[in-house]
Image (spheres, grey):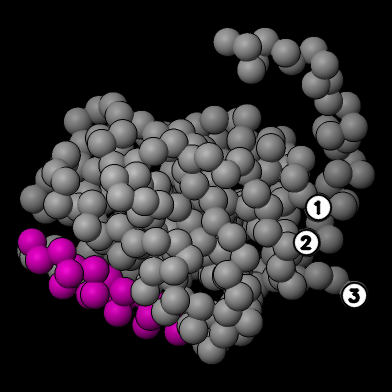
Amino acid sequence: MPRITRAALIQASNALPDSTDLDAIKKAMIDKHIDLIGKAAERGANVCCLQEIFYGPYFCAEQDPRWYRTAEPVPDGPTIGLMQELAKQHKMVMVVPVYEEAMTGVYYNTAAVIDEEGTYLGKYRKHHIPHCHPGFWEKFYFTPGDVGYPVFETRYGNIGVYICYDRHFPEGARELGLNGAEIVFNPSATVAGLSEYLWKLEQPAHAVANQYFVGAINRVGTEAPWNIGEFYGQSYFCDPRGQIMVEGSRDQDEVVIADLDLDTIQEVRDTWQFFRDRRPESYENIAAW
C-alpha cells in the first residue's frame, strides 16, 4: 500500500507591521498561525512546518538586545507547549521554528519537532549563521547549532530540518540523507534581490543529490521599520527528482499542501545509486579546510 503523507507549509506576513510592542507582535503572530494550522488540519495535513522564527518579524535586520527577551526554552517554553497541544488536537506532526534560550545569554535559531500525539521528539539548531549584507546580522543573535543533523522518525515519515542559510551548504543536506531523512523542511526568511535566483536551484538540487522530498518555506511581505526587501513567499515542495510539485504565491499568507508519495524515494534510489557510488574516503579535504 502506498505511503502517502499530506504535508503542509505555512508562509505568513507580520501580523502587526506597525507595532513595536514585542509581546503584542508575538501574540498576534501565534494567533495568526493557530488559525493557519487549523486550516492545514482541515485540508487533511499529516505534517505541518512553520516559517523561520514564526512568531515574530525577521528581527535580524537590526542589532538590538531587546529581541533576546522573545527567546524561550525548548521544549519547556510556552510556545512549544501550545504547539504540542495543537499537534495532539489535530493529530498532526508539527515542525516549529522558534528563538531558543538555552541558558542565560546563549541563544539558538531552533526548530522543535512534535509528533501527532503531542510528544516532543527533539530539535534541530541552525548550523550556518550569516553575518553579511545589510540586514542579516544573525551572529548577534544566534550561536551555531551543536546537535548535529538529527532525523526524527514519525508515523508520516522520517523528518529532517535545515534552516534558511543552511540551504547554501550541501554538506548538511547530505548528512540528513545519510541519517535517513525522507522529508527535509527548510523554513526560511529571504528577500528578493539577494538570493531569489537560488531559491529554486539549491533545494531541488539537494533533493536530487539525496533523493528525498524537500519543503521550502519563505515568509511574505515587507517588514518595517527595516524594509530590507520583499520576503517573496513562493514556498514549495519538490520531489526526489528535484521537480517542484506545488508552489505558493509571492505575497499572500498561505497554506501550501502536497501529497508526498514516500515510496518514490525507493524508486528513485533504485534508479540513481548515488549513495552506493559515494567515495567518502576520497573527500577528506572537505572537513580539513
Q: CA distance from mark 1 to mark 2?
A: 6 Å
Give the residue at x 17% y 69%: 23
Q: Which residue is found at the position 88% from the left and 51% from the top?
A: 267
Which of the image's four quarters has the C terminus?
Answer: top right
Kindly state the secondary structure of the residue where label 1 is placed.
Answer: helix
Instruction: Indicate whether residue 30 is drawn in magenta.
Output: yes
Residue sitting at the far front: 104
Amino acid type, callout 1:
Ile
Residue under pointer 2: 262
Q: Which sits earlier in the primary sequence, circle 2 or circle 3?
A: 3
What is the magenta range? 20-38
**Left or right of 77 in this view: 92:** right
Q: Earlier in the sequence, mark 1 or mark 3?
A: 3
Residue type at mark 3: give it: Met
Find out whether the residues at labels 1 and 2 contact each other: C-beta distance under 8 Å.
Answer: yes
Residue located beneath label 3 in the image: 1
Q: Residue at x 50, y 32 (%)?
A: 168
Q: Is residue 238 visible?
A: no
Tell me which residue sits at (51%, 78%) in the image. Answer: 84
Can you say whether 65 is above or below 130 in the image? below
Q: Amino acid at mark 2?
A: Leu
